[in-house]
Amino acid sequence: MLRLVFVKKERSMLSNILKKLLSVIPLLLIISIVLFILINALPGDATMSMIGETADEEYVAQLREKMGLDKPVVARYFSWLADVLRGDLGESLVSSETVAQKIKMRLPITLEITLVSMLISVLIALPFGVLSAVKRGSAVDTVGSVVSMLGVAMPSFWLGLLLVMYFSVQKGLLPASGFTSFSQDPVKNLRCIILPCVSIGFGFAATVMRQTRSSLLEVLQQDYIMTAQAKGLRNRIVIWKHAMRNALIPVLTVTAMQIGRLIGGAVVTEAVFAIPGMGSAIVSSVLNRDYPVAMGMIMVVAAIVVLINTFVDVLYILIDPRISVRPKKG
């Protein structure tokens, strides 16, 4: 009997995981439709960026026909979608490079900055959030609350400018702009990404720290935690083994929701620090009305965010299988 119940619960868990994974496809499809409409709603097109507004109208019409810009938006969308399903993201309307080549060059840079920012933020935020919860009302808790409020309120690009003014302009300790890959020079790579990562990660760390504190404070009031403490278990074991397991679910939720903000912050911060990542390429492609590049790069970023959020949803189910079990009505 117990084995049968266990098998049913396991099937329910696998079914929910499969549903989460399959939901990615229609979500990305909807994102692509909305994005394509918004990009094509912008005034002007790539021909104006290439030959200017004073060019001969006949030549502009020929160029638009050659680029396929004379077709209706719906026809262009389905043509783009068919190419994407074949693995072809298209070519830039402004340059001769393919969109795949541009993504291959720029995506690793943005991912490096985003992942390093997230890693540093989580490693700092989780211990400080736990410490603030355990020492509630102390000086440590007060300082942590003030710092987290500053992190949430302060825009990443503004913090980046302040860091550049102090560490680069005044002290000359770190480069103000530019990027060197890790394979070329690991030390120089680290020096180039320190300021961007701190700029992006500060707000992320503040949000995770606040959520960790509030979630852990709520869990520490539960009866089973008090029972564990009454049995004489060490406080470290009670917090990290029992309390944090349940407190992590809301923290994972906030972390997943903040990943989009983190990548968005990377896009803006890349412009501040002149880093040749996805952000600067998206901005330039939108300004030049280079639709294939803008669509390809934004969809890649959107796909990464959606997949990470889906992965976190699956983690919820694995951490707490009760999430996948819904009581039947009636």
Image (tube, grey):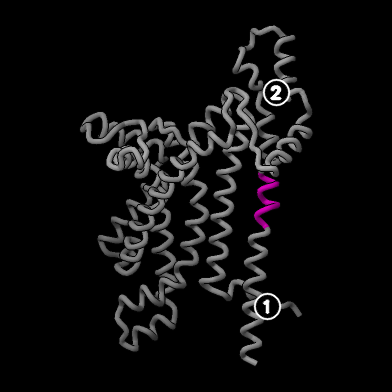
Q: Main secondary structure of the magenta part?
A: helix
Instruction: Note whether 240 is above or below 268 in the view shown.
Output: below
Reading the image, the residue beneath label 2 is 67
Q: Is residue 108 visible?
A: yes
The disc placed on residue 11 is none
In this rendering, position of residue 162 left or right of residue 89: left
Which residue occupies 35% across, 41% down?
183
Camera-side residue of 81 and 212: 81
- Mark 1, secondary structure of its residue: loop
Instruction: Give the quadrant of residue 32.
Output: top right
Image position of 194 (left or right of 309): left
Residue 322 image offset from top left, x and y in percent: 58, 76
Q: In what quadrant of the picture does the C terminus appear? A: bottom right
Examine the structure image and report whether residue 305 is included in the region drawn in magenta: no
Q: CA distance from mark 2 to mark 1?
A: 55 Å
Which quadrant of the figure contains the N terminus? bottom right
- Against 149, residue 165 (above or below) is above
Which amino acid is tagged 2? Met
Graded by Cα atoms within 10 Å as few (under 14), some (14 to 19) or many (20 or more), the crowding at tag 1 reads few
Q: Residue at x 68, y 77 (%)?
A: 327
Q: Which residue is mark 1?
A: 327
